[in-house]
Image: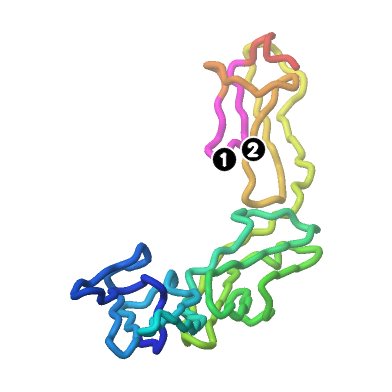
Amino acid sequence: MALSSAPLHKGQLPWGGLLLTGPAYSGRETIYPNGSLLFQNVTQKDTGAYTLQMLMQIFDSMKVSVQFHVYHGPDDPIISPSNTYFRSRRNLSLSCQTASNPPALYSWFVNGEFLSSSQELLIPNITANNSGSYTCFVYNSVTGLNKTTVKYIEVLEPVTTPSIQVTNTTVKELDSVFLNCSSNDTRISIHWLFNGQILELTDSMKLSLDNRTLSIDPVKREDSG
């Protein structure tokens, strides 16, 4: 890319048969005798004001400036917050960010269906039906480039009160007893408490693979509680 004006000491400056360079010179700039400035491999850092200074034989000088803009992006968008799980009956607020010049255009898709053209997404009073994939699509109208980021969100419903079925609440020592925890909820983990404390299994206790059933065989007096 070539400009007809040059930054002060940006590129190579002929002086007394030598080529002088300034602190902003990166090796990608070339100044031509007619005052043109050539950029190679333009980057975002090249954005800024450039000034061409012309020195006259009578030691007068003239300056002309130009503002140079580099269009770029968008970068990969970032969806925040980073949470995956959200409680139901609350508002879901998501934000999407990307680096882009000019600013990117934003769109939201939920499970592949268009939902909103905004950087922020707000869904009030969410339920389990709002679980799914949330896609932030960003587009730069000048560069013609676009990027997407997909985030999976799961909305968790409140856990209902479980119930316990037991073969017998009053047993003789050395008998056996089975306790079963019943719940209609899914995707839950079950833990047993004994007198308000996390149950520590003894040699006579066994749990099923899903922790729903606790068997005690044989029962000992210290198992009362």
Residue 165 at what x, y percent from top left?
Answer: 73, 35
Q: Is residue 147 visible?
A: no
Which numbered disc flags the more N-terminal residue, 1 or 2?
2
Which quadrant does the N terminus fall into?
bottom left
The one of 163 and 185 positioned closer to us in this rendering:
185
Q: Are marks 1 and 2 in contact (CB under 8 Å)?
A: yes
Label of residue 140 in the image: none
Residue type, numbered disc 2 = Ile
Does residue 163 lie above or below 108 as drawn? above
- Report how far apart the C-alphas of labels 1 and 2 lie in the structure: 8 Å
Q: Can you identify the residue that label 1 sits on?
A: 210
Does residue 15 lie above or below 193 as drawn? below
Q: Residue at x 59, y 77 (%)?
A: 103
Residue 17 at what x, y percent from top left?
Answer: 18, 75
Q: Which residues are magenta?
A: 206-218
Is 217 within the magenta? yes
Q: Residue at x 59, y 36 (%)?
A: 211
Label of residue 190 in the image: 2
Q: Quadrant of residue 137?
A: bottom right
Q: Residue at x 39, y 89 (%)?
A: 4
